[in-house]
Image (cartoon, rainbow, N blue to C red):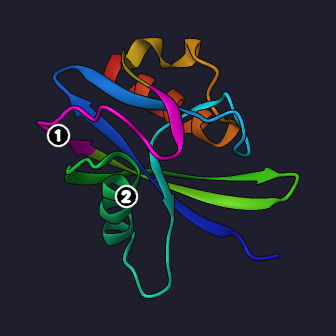
Amino acid sequence: MAIIKVVCGIIFKDDLVLICRRKPEKSLGGYWEFPGGKVEEAESYEESLLRELIEELNLKVEIKQHFFDTVHHYDKGAIELISFICETENIPSESTDHDQLEWVKVSDLINWKLAPADVPIAKELIEKFEG
C-alpha cells in the first residue's frame, strides 16, 4: 500500500504554535494536530500546505523552512507527515476540519493529546526550540 503524503504547518505567532483538534466525526476525532492535509497530484509540498491552510482555516502563512518528516503506520494505512515552520500575522477563528483551535507554548505541546503522527514532530520542536 502506498504511503500517503501529508503536509502540516508548524505555525508560529509570537512565541506560540497553533494546534487544532479534529472534529469528533473525523478519523482521529478528538486528537490535536498541526494543521495541513493531503498533497494533491502535481502540487509541491509548499503549494499543498498553502492551499490546505486557506481551505481549512482561511489562514495565510509565510513558509519559512522545511522542518521534519515522519512516517506513521495507522490501521488504515501509512502517512508521511512533512512539516514546515510557518509564520502568520493572522488569527484563524474557525476551521472546516476542527472543532477547537489553540495557541500553545512549544514546551507544552507534549501535554496535549496529539495525533500519533504529530508526536515525533512535537518532540523534535521541543528539542530544537527548548533544548
Quadrant (top left/top right/bottom left/bottom right) for the C terminus: top left
**Which quadrant of the figure has residue 77?**
bottom right
**Could you say which quadrant of the image residue 88 lies in?**
top left
Image coords of residue 107 (percent x, y): 41, 13
Choose between 74 and 59: the one closer to the eye: 59
Q: Can the viewer see residue 31 in this picture? A: yes
Please name the residue shown 25% across and 47% down the image.
Answer: 59
> Which one is nearer the viewer's eye here, 102 or 69?
102
Residue 58's place in the image compared with 37, above or below, is above
Q: Is residue 48 above or below residue 114?
A: below
The span from disc 2 to disc 1 (Cα, nearest Å) is 16 Å
- Identify the residue at horizontal 16%, vertical 36% (top origin): 90
Q: Nearer the viewer, residue 76 or 95?
A: 95
Question: What amino acid is labelled 2 in the image?
Answer: Glu
Q: Residue furthest right?
A: 75
Q: Is residue 88 magenta?
A: yes
Instruction: Classify 106 as above or below 64.
Output: above
* Mark 2 in CB contact with mark 1 (< 8 angstroms): no
Tag 1: residue type? Thr
- Whichever of labels 2 and 1 marks the residue nearer the N terminus, that label is 2
Query: Where residue 48 sits: x, y (%)?
Result: 38, 68
Identify the magenta region.
86-100
Q: Secondary structure at mark 1?
A: loop
Answer left or right for 76 relative to 36: right
Coordinates of residue 56 in the picture (x, y in percent): 41, 51
Q: Residue at x 32, y 66 (%)?
A: 46
Viewed as shown, does residue 28 lie left or right of 76? left
Residue 88 is labelled as: 1
> Mark 2 packing: few (<14 Cα in 10 Å), some, or many (20+)?
some
- Can you identify the residue that label 2 sits on? 55
- In this view, 38 is above or below 104: below
